[in-house]
Image (cartoon, rainbow, N blue to C red):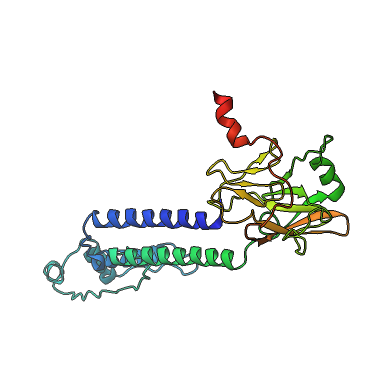
Amino acid sequence: MSIVELSFIAIAAIGVLGVVGIVAIVTGRGSRNIDWKKNLDKRAVKAEKSKEKTSFFAPSKPKSVEEVNVEEAVDTDETEEDIEETDGSIKIEEKVVYEEISEEERYITRKQFLGKALGGTFGAFMGIQALAWLGFLWPKVSGGFGSKVDAGTIEDLKNQIIQADGSVIPAFIPEARAYVLPFSESTAGDSQFTDGSTIADGLVAVYQRCVHLGCRVPWCNSSQGFECPCHGSKYNMVGEYYAGPAPRNLDRFVVNVSSSGKLIIDTGTIIESPRAPGLSVKYPQGLSCIALAPTEES
């Protein structure tokens, strides 16, 4: 799966998650009316009391009557007037202490959640777009189609291609998406390919794609050429146009021989050529595979 397809899948998944989150928030419960100041006061008082009880370093002091009365008043939520009625000789002033808390300690509001969700979604989208652009600008060309492919040694390829009876069966190289075929410059005559870089030590590499609508063109052993089953375009052994709706010859790759005697196919360089005025190699040399198909079914 290519990086572009992965990018589209990831973008679709993020969009679905964002929609689900927004729907869940909108249809959720209303905002809670919480008297957080009252709750904070009780927590602050209890925290101070717990510090006094669990102190291991400071000795505990006996509590005075005023301190005891203050704690009882806070715990029982008594007002100032109630305390004065129970003991008229003591005047108590209640002081409320507020303790600041961070935003993380408070509950998150709906507005904050939506802002963070949208920000995260946008950030993920931009990250995926950046990866896609990096993959497009700097593609991986260390191997496979689009790079230079090692098709094997010249000797092994020729032994595989040329049969004992003199017929030819091309060597298909999957990594290059190409057929390797023999092409003798001495017998080619006035071929339009003799002066190019598409011939190396008597071998050529022909792209498997039909130049009409992009179908893969199979090899026909009986006619010794390529015949497209989609719309009937036909080419001879070295990819020169013979018949059909194809506008030109089959495309070819630049090839060369390495120092170790191997055929190197540069799939990053595709050579296009117009229809040949004359065929360099005879075609057809036998029955056509497309014409034979209906006869075999009958």
Does residue 165 appear in the picture of this structure? Answer: yes
Q: Position of residue 265 (x, y in %)?
A: 74, 56
Q: Quadrant of residue 90?
A: bottom left
Tell whether 70 sits left or right of 254.
left
Front residue (pair 109, 205): 205
Tell whether 200 sits left or right of 25.
right
Residue at image coords 73%, 60%: 193
Number of numbered discs present? Answer: 0
Front residue (pair 105, 8): 8
Q: Position of residue 136 (x, y in %)?
A: 57, 65
Q: Is residue 137 above or below residue 234?
A: below
- Taking the view exactly as shown, the residue that stands out farthest to the top is 298
Quarter of the image with the C terminus is top right
Front residue (pair 289, 265): 289
Residue at image coords 88%, 56%: 260
Residue at image coords 68%, 51%: 239
Does residue 176 appear in the picture of this structure? Answer: no
Residue at image coords 81%, 49%: 152
Tell whether 269 sits left or right of 210.
right
